[in-house]
Image: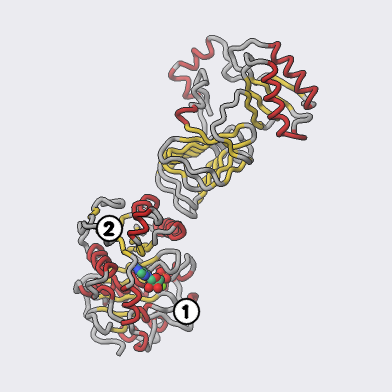
Amino acid sequence: MAGGSLKRCALEGKIIVITSGKGGVGKTTATASIGAALALEGKQVAVVDMDIGLRNLDVVMGLENRIVFNIVDAVKGKCKIKQAAIKDRRIENLYLIPASQSDNKDILNPEAMVRFCKELRKEFDYVLLDCPAGIERGFENSVAPADEAVVICTPEISSVRDADRVIGLLYARSITPKLIVNRIVPEMVEKGDMLSHEDVVEVLSIELLGLVEMDSQVIISTNTGVPLVLQKESSAGQAFRRIAMRLNGQKNLPIEIPQSSKSFWKRVGQKIGIGK
Amino acid sequence: MDIQSQDKSQVRLKGVKEGFYVTLDPTLPQVFLEEELTRLFNQLQHLASNSRVILDIGETQNRQDVVESLTAFLKNKYHVKSVSAPQREQQMTEDKPRKLDMPGNWHQHHTDALIIAGRVRSGQKISAKKHLVILGDVNPGSEIIAGGDILIMGNLGGTALAGQPDNEDAIILAIGFKPIQIQIGGIIAAGLPTSSAHTIEFAHVENQGIIVENYIKANPFGRLTWPVVR
Ligand SMILES: Nc1ncnc2c1ncn2[C@@H]1O[C@H](COP(=O)(O)OP(=O)(O)O)[C@@H](O)[C@H]1O
Ligand SMILES: [Mg+2]
């Protein structure tokens, strides 16, 4: 049940917001997968669903039926962090702090989130905030306490436009964001029917963390409850594992470029993005 | 407004604050000049009558005869109010250019330009009182506005408004010219054809329309005999 024993960390943990502007691009998928991968690296990790009123990180992680308390309870002091943090069923050191389903986003405010995350820092090495779509209150609440930001973008014009907007807003708050391009279909890119990651990086020009392929395992994993990153067959799962390693300090880990199955070799690109 | 491709017509017309500015080569046959003027002035419709026309036949030509006959032509056919010669800053005496050529003299001249470096992102808006120079890319979804020229040392993908509110002499120049929309003075061009990457192009107003041309080929300021302040 909720709780379990949370180890204290020697150093203060990092708060990372996962954001995009546009909805449905893979923030929740990325939060669950990167969180799981960081925990597999031996880190104490909390993933936090900031989508008050529309929670779904719990569903993706298969922890829906264990929710007793949620983030609003924890922020308002109605429960302890320990009580709101649900331990993952499979992965050690991974905890979920779920959103409240019944409230709306105005129940939280940036100042309260900064205070709450200060507490979370003491308990976890990494705290990943799954930001809701949009650039309103829910975005403000998620960005205010963040030390770092990961922007998720798909290879579509509208997604790039929204990501660009969000990147501007993050820079305005002195946060330097990093980029993940998700849902890449290599066959379409090769035919010229989809923007390539180079096109996306050219416009957004921020450091690239990784490229994630469109992968049916993402949906299968949501249904079976087996974390994506534990599936050896899943290209998306493996991409998220490498992304987690890069976030965790392995800066020189090469970025693998998704290839259509007919290609023989895995092309490896190291010099992509800014600051590489 | 319609967008014309590279159309190097020998008779050009543009709207200015005072009326219309017509540039032509007086050595061309009179019949041809009248035909071209008819074509351009017909487009102006009712705006032509009672307007002031500035007729520019270039500097080196001394063709008062052509000026007179075209003045009569425009007055009779389009009832323009007046036809006059341009006030030429460049029409200088012999020693004025020499003075200008002196290195120190330029210190007395100045022009306002906002020069910024970096990427302008979607949702961001930058406006400059006069000229705007951006060293970097201007992303789709952003908006840049200037009272004078806009010069972008990078890709222009956003919306650019130069010469605001009413300076149709302003230009918009970019190394990668692929804007969503541009406006010069009061003239708007949307849905510009996308051009090949990384050729330096510039937009300017000609005959009441926005024209985009290769900057190097058109060399629009190459014909100024002396550098002038913009
Ligand atoms: N790499 C991927 N391959 C296939 N489907 C994906 C991928 N990433 C996300 N999806 C699917 O896209 C949908 C939206 O993803 P989600 O993570 O909920 O986005 P967001 O949180 O940004 O709204 C979900 O149905 C998810 O399963
Ligand atoms: Mg989501």
**Of B189 and A215, the residue lying toward us:** A215
Q: Which of A171 and A26 is in front in this view?
A: A26
Kindly tell me whether mark 1's CB lies below 8 Å from ligand 2: no
Q: Residue A257 carries which label?
A: 2
In this rendering, position of residue B78 left or right of residue A234? right
Check disc 1 and report its element: helix, strand or loop. loop
Chain at tag 1: A
Which of pointers 1 and 2 indicates the residue nearer the eye? 2
Single out the residue that lies furthest toward the front.
A262
Q: Where is residue A9 in the image (x, y as percent from the top left)?
A: 21, 75
Question: Is B2 above or below relative to A200?
Answer: above
Disc 2 residue type? Ile
Q: Of the numbered discs in the image, which one, if any, rests on residue A124?
A: none
Colouring scheme, one of rainbow, by chain, secondary structure, one colour: secondary structure
Tell me the crowding category of disc 1: few under 14, some 14 to 19, or many 20 or more residues within 10 angstroms, Cα based. few
> Which residue corresponds to mark 1?
A53
